[in-house]
Image (cartoon, grey):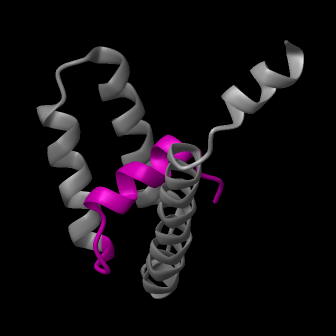
Amino acid sequence: MKLNMKEKKILYAYACPSHHNTVTRLKWLTALTVDPEAKGQMLHLTRKIEAETDESWYDSFYHRLRMEMDEYYRIKHRLRVLKANTDYEEELYEEAV
């Protein structure tokens, strides 16, 4: 199953190791979503998880997704720290002048 980054972020926030509970939670989130475009995306994700994933391998899928997204957020944090501690703009300005 292919997931885009928005779908991965939603699953990272709202999924759990239980396939049934995750699908139920996503259905409730879809019902609570007000924006029509976001509601359509949530409904598409809910149907994708419900139809394309089998309960027998969902637990492995969930843990792999958690590891992937943990690494994504760790790298994103490191880049933010690196940008905050680097004065690359001033160095480029001095070389140009």
Is residue 7 positioned above or below 92 on the image? below
- Total count of labels: 0
Quadrant in the picture for residue 86: top right
What residue is shown at x 23% (from left), y 37% (from top)?
A: 30
Quadrant for the C terminus in the image: top right
Is residue 48 visible in this depiction of the protein? no
Q: Nearer the viewer, residue 55 or 83?
A: 83
Quadrant holding the N terminus = bottom right
Q: Is residue 31 magenta?
A: no
Picture coordinates of residue 27, whole percent (x, y): 22, 47
The answer to whether residue 89 of the structure is visible from this angle is: yes
Residue shown at 50% from the left, 65% from the top? 69
Drawn side of residue 17 relative to residue 68, left or right: left
Q: Position of residue 81 (x, y in %)?
A: 50, 54
Q: Position of residue 9 (x, y in %)?
A: 42, 51
On screen, residue 28 versus residue 94, left or right, reads: left
Q: Is residue 33 above or below residue 75?
A: above
Left or right of 12? Residue 18 is left
Image coordinates for residue 37, horizontal then vertical, percent: 37, 18
Establish if 96 lies above or below 12. Answer: above
Q: Based on the picture, tell me whether residue 5 belongs to the magenta stretch.
A: yes
